[in-house]
Amino acid sequence: MTVETVDLDALSDVALKVLNSNKEDAEFGEAKEFRKYDRSKELMEQLLDGVLSKKACTTVKNHIKKIEESIGTALGEKGTNNHVYFTLEEIHLIYDALLGMNTKYHANIPQKFTMSEAYVWLLTNLKGGTGKTTASVYLAIALALYSFQRPRILVVDTDPQGQVHEYFDGRVINQDTTPTLGQVVSGFAVAPKGMDHLEWLKTSVVRKSHVANIDYIPALPSDTRLERFLNKKYFSPETEYDCLKLLNEKVIAPLKSSYDIILIDSPPHNNLSVQSGIYCADGIIIPAATKPMDSEPTLAYVKELAHKVNILKEELDYPGVKAVRALPGMFNERRVSAKTVKRRYSKVFQEMLLPEIIEREGYLNASQQFRTMFDYSTNDDAGTPQRSHIINDWNSVAEQLLRYMERYDDLKVGEE
């Protein structure tokens, strides 16, 4: 009896036909919408320190009317409860305008977080399942929303699984007409003749997320070609170390002046895409799950990172990593093993250890829809009372990183 084999070529042809069946549509499906903000409960409470007297509220409303008159359009919309709700973009517009007005509550208006040049963080860990993409997305949104300080954030996805796009947009996109990170770095996608490279990046490669001050560059399954492209150059008879600079030269460096923070989400591999990300990075964040099976490879990865950095220093003009942070995740204080693992991380990273992210069931329901707890207005909307706790966890991390970046930028500007 002859055992038949599967005709993978034929199977591949069918798969490609399905993929190509929607080529006429650049995108289809519904783009995600971010939550809205209650004028009274959220905007006014911050501006008026929680003292919502009728006179003070009327003053704020009058200031918003002046802003509406200056831009020629009404802001907000009434909900079924007769409250007025603003989009995050409208909230930012209002705060920016109020900073230029003479108000008694000026001290309560959130100041903008700005950097002289974007600080680049690489989120990386060789161990899969440590929550790199979850950390990238939650951290990006936490930084974007923290105290309404409005930093401009770019998330760059180097993981061909492409889940960053699922969180920030979610529509099915045409892989032929959407330039991805891998296509740009490998030269498969280039700016049209006559168009400046930076202009092309901003208009065709960078995408708007559903959060007003977060943009992102997607990766898709086809981006596995990037690693093949880098391997071909790096493992040639004469090693082309310069290929590790391409991500920075073609994408990160040109965009640094347009953002305050850039987060690079890396794949769970020890490959050249990760090493390219290290070359771009000012700082490295290691998502470190507090489970015994994760701690050994996570700690071993620190040595591998040191080795990669040393190669970049020796072969290229890389100055070194300015900061390393470990982010202990999936922490359950009821598990003795989790406490033990966290103590191990503390011994290694000491002051570089960020506040832990508690393991909570609330993540599961949201992640199944590629949403975060920040997407919901209330615990009831999220379907879990854990929403507030999850947001507080990430806000603690965001606060530490923002304060560090502020100090770093002050020192950098002072030296210049």
Image (cartoon, rainbow, N blue to C red):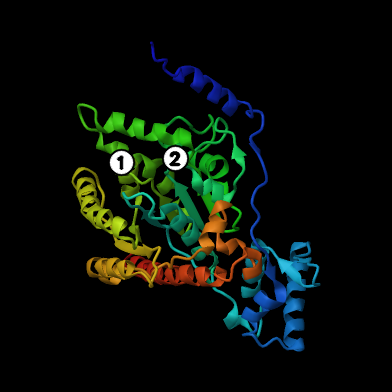
User: Residue 133 placed where, x, y %?
Assistant: 45, 52
Query: What's the residue type where badge 1 is placed?
Result: Asn
Work out whether residue 134 or residue 111 is closer to the camera in this orientation and state it: 134
Residue depicted at x 77% and y 73%: 83
Kind of element beneath mark 2: loop
Residue 383 shown left or right of residue 316 in the figure: right
Residue with the mark numbered 2? 160
| The C terminus sits in image quarter | bottom left
Residue depicted at x 36% and y 49%: 128
Residue with the mark numbered 1? 271
Kind of element beneath mark 1: loop
Q: Is residue 5 visible?
A: yes
User: Residue 249 placed where, x, y %?
Assistant: 38, 42
Residue 393 shown left or right of residue 234 in the figure: right
Query: What's the residue type where badge 2 is placed?
Result: Pro
Work out whether residue 263 or residue 292 is closer to the camera in this orientation and state it: 292
